[in-house]
Image (cartoon, rainbow, N blue to C red):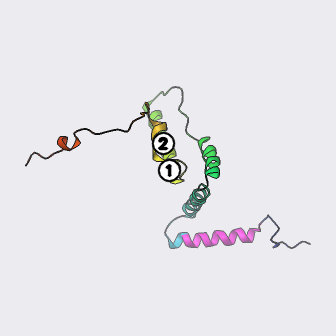
Amino acid sequence: MPNQLAQSKRRQSLAEHEAVLAALAAIAQREDTTVMALLRQATRNLVKTRATTPTQAARLRQAVWAKAPRMPATFKTAAQVARFKRSQREFDQVLLDLALASPQAIQERNSLAPSPQSVRMIDFDSAHATAAR
């Protein structure tokens, strides 16, 4: 019978999984959170660290973009528009959190009319000056 704890084995025993989950449960209880929240945090950190190399970031970006919210051809209710906009905002936030897109890239993608120039504020200080001098 082969050794079940051999390092060459890819399959892990149920006891090992239970031990890791028990440790996670203890951490979650001590930090007053859930095991799922800890798992989400760990997976996001893993993706973020893997996205540091340009080639890996490009692969990850491609996989994530495949899951981007798609706008339907027509909206029948205002609630559908709100749901789509909320899912789009959440998707944009995930891209930022995982360091897969810059704020400028998201702005360009979401903008109706991308501008080749930066927005400039003219006479901003005089428009917001106080009346008392």
Task: Name the residue at the left extreme.
Answer: 133
On the image, numbered disc 2 is attached to which residue?
106
Q: What x and y, as percent, mark residue 131?
A: 10, 45
On the image, numbered disc 1 is attached to which residue?
96
SS category of the residue bearing label 2: helix
Residues rendered magenta in the picture: 12-27
- In the depicted structure, whether residue 20 falls above or below residue 128: below
Give residue 44's quadrant in the image. Answer: bottom right
Looking at the picture, which amino acid does disc 1 mark?
A: Leu
- Number of marks drawn: 2
**Residue 122, magenta (yes or no):** no
Q: Residue at x 53, y 52 (%)?
A: 99
Q: Residues within 10 Å of mark 1 (few under 14, many from 20)?
A: some
Tell me whether the residue at label 2 lies in contact with that at label 1, contact meaning CB atoms closer than 8 angstroms: yes
Q: What x and y, as percent, mark residue 105?
A: 49, 42
The overriding secondary structure of the stretch rendered in magenta is helix
